[in-house]
Amino acid sequence: MSTYWIKNVSILGGAPTDLLLANGVIERVGAGISTSSTTEGVEEIDGTGLIALPGLVDLHTHLREPGREDAETVESGTRAAAMGGFTAVHAMANTEPVADTAGVVEQVWRLGREAGYCDVYPVGAVTVGLAGQQLAELGAMADSAARVRVFSDDGKCVSDAVLMRRALEYVKAFDGVVAQHAQEPRLTEGAQMNEGPLSGRLGLAGWPAVAEEAIIARDVLLAEHVGSRLHVCHVSTAGSVELIRWAKGKGVDVTAEACPHHLLLTDDLAATYDPIYKVNPPLRSTADAEALRAGLADGTIDIVATDHAPHPHEDKDCEWAAAAFGMLGLETALSIVQQTMVDPGLLDWAGVADRMSAAPARIGRVADHGRPIAEGEPANVVLYDPAATRVIDPAETQSLSRNTPYRGMELPGRVVATFLRGKATVLDGKIQ
Amino acid sequence: MKRHLLSAGDLTRDDAELILSTAAELRELADRPIKKLPALRGRTVVNLFFEDSTRTRISFEAAAKRLSADVINFAAKGSSLSKGESLKDTALTLEAMGADAVVVRHGASGAPHRLANSGWVRSSVVNAGDGTHEHPTQALLDAFTMSRHLGTGPKGSLDGRRIAIVGDVLHSRVARSNALLLHTLGAEVTLVAPPTLFPVGVESWPVEISYDLDAVIPKADAVMMLRVQRERMSGGFFPTAREYSRRYGLDGRRMATLQDHTIVMHPGPMVRGMEITADVADADRSVIVEQVTNGVAVRMAVLYLLLGGSEPAVGGEE
């Protein structure tokens, strides 16, 4: 394994210093590293102008394998993750077959290990086949080699209140968490975009904010009642932020995520009728996006999660109603957080490290990720150049799919290198 | 004018007035023994209908044929929504056949917009009704009909005329297109429906809204009734058909409160006994059948203007 001597790098935006990554750990931190203190064959990296962050952790990734290997595989998805600065991703359960048994989660986990770009933590389905009828064998998935701790029917809401209560209670036995896709199904039948003045004009069936907020309100009350841990996926409305703030104020053990696209993009893009902007939950209003940013800044929203959702070209190259929901996100997440949070002064780099690494690792109960950049810690590190800019070209993605809504946009920042336990998965901005 | 007709909102007042005045010239043809002009000879118009529609398709077909265009009818039952051939592949097929204009009816809102803007085809795209979005040629023929009965001045201006549009606004592409076009033409539009059949955000439209039909129609110069599909009842938008008819249907009693000159319109197909009673539909003030005749003239004008007719449509030498 190579040894990397990163010179003159800024840890979390602090004063420039040096980092020595060797034997899978951060061996030295500080300007005092000398060549004599290093071994032979050390690879030097000029870190001038670069920020060092702990390897990013995504709590919400769709890797599509098994079942939709035409859209993404564990290997292609984790390559995209590495390019985005991630060293760990949680792979959502809505595969074919659904990840609702120990066998499927172990398969996904093993595929991640074999690919080697990123640690893959499978998310287990809450209910058998995501059907919302009967609890899946959550304990078996928790006890499997994949050690599942996050359970979600993402893509579908656990809408039955009794089933949700039981799931919240049951996962306490192994310190699990239920990550809820908050979408009241009856209020969103056929829904296509945020319900508001624009949906009425475009004749696209509206997806009201209350469909998300009603479920969140119910779930935080349930979590309080049974003393369980709840995580809310892809919060998209100002009202949801308000409810979570209220619940946290009451001491409810709830965490929440926001997606980069909900921080940056708004529902007016639907006027193009281009389904590249079709996503679940839908893009919302400017006021909603601002509330999400404020919530992420003050910690009401704990983390940024990508909801990276690859789809083959034909599922987006069609009329809006026929298209699939979802957009790519892994390779652009950090840039969008820089643009929406760091550059406007809402969050510093230490805050970014918390929202995109430490906090998601904590929620997912992942021990070796989200650690501080300090001597003796696992060498999961990303080097990021915040001064760079790039124009997003879908053809350059590592994903097998091309459905990025940022096509042609100029975004700030660039991941220069990603290290997973001291091994470079990205170097000089190139996948290794 | 733009190359496509996707939304009534895309039309400036000049555009709309040009279409209406061209239609007025073409309307005279309907009374001639020979109804055909050579204006679009050699051009190909494709009627691409992903949804069942009798009157709109026939109207476009008649319009294109009276301008001597070649017409291809393409009834693509089962869109990509039902895993048939995709909209894109259908479009590429038509493009390969050399269509100059594609008249598209589709169940998905925005499908004509996608057809026009995704680079799949080069031809002009005419929206003949998309989902619950728009139906701009219906609005044009409605405005044309109103102009003939209610218009003032040499252009048949609708400035200040009061138009009531009554019914399922939420799901109606006719209501959307009419609200936009009539506003552009200076008319004052009031939409009337039960609160469940208005879309969220309708306050931002350039119209008045009302839940009270009896309060609105005595002041109206035209009352346009929209079809209420029976399947809306299962959606719980209103309790029963009978209650809907009682509160929002146009019957003889309500018709008696109209001003003498007020016309009654309906885009069809009507559900007699639901939103309109038979005696109203067949009354002298009903212009429902005339709307159909005017539809051909308006669609002739649209096709003619979109396909680049800079010469006058009528009386121009070949």
Image (spheres, rainbow, N blue to C red):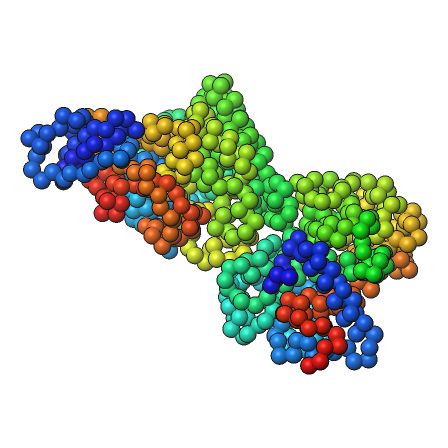
The image position of residue A162, as x and y in percent, is 52, 31
Examine the rendered structure and indicate whether residue B318 appears above or below residue B209: below
Q: Is residue B141 left or right of residue A38?
A: right
The image position of residue A236, as x and y in percent, is 50, 36
In the foreground, B116 or A420: B116
Q: Quadrant of residue A217?
A: top right
Q: Residue at x 40, y 33 (%)?
A: A343
Q: Visible in this render: residue B108?
A: yes
Q: Visible in this render: residue A105?
A: no
Q: Residue at x 50, y 64 (%)?
A: B120
Q: Residue at x 19, y 30 (%)?
A: A18
In the foreground, B297 or B234: B297
Q: Quadrant of residue B103?
A: bottom right
Q: Quadrant of the C terminus of chain B?
A: bottom right
Q: Quadrant of the N terminus of chain B?
A: bottom right
The image position of residue A51, as x and y in percent, is 28, 33
Examine the rendered structure and indicate whether residue A394 appears above or below residue A281: below
Q: Residue at x 23, y 28 (%)?
A: A16
Examine the rendered structure and indicate whether residue A176 appears above or below residue A121: above
Q: Is residue A75 left or right of residue A275?
A: left
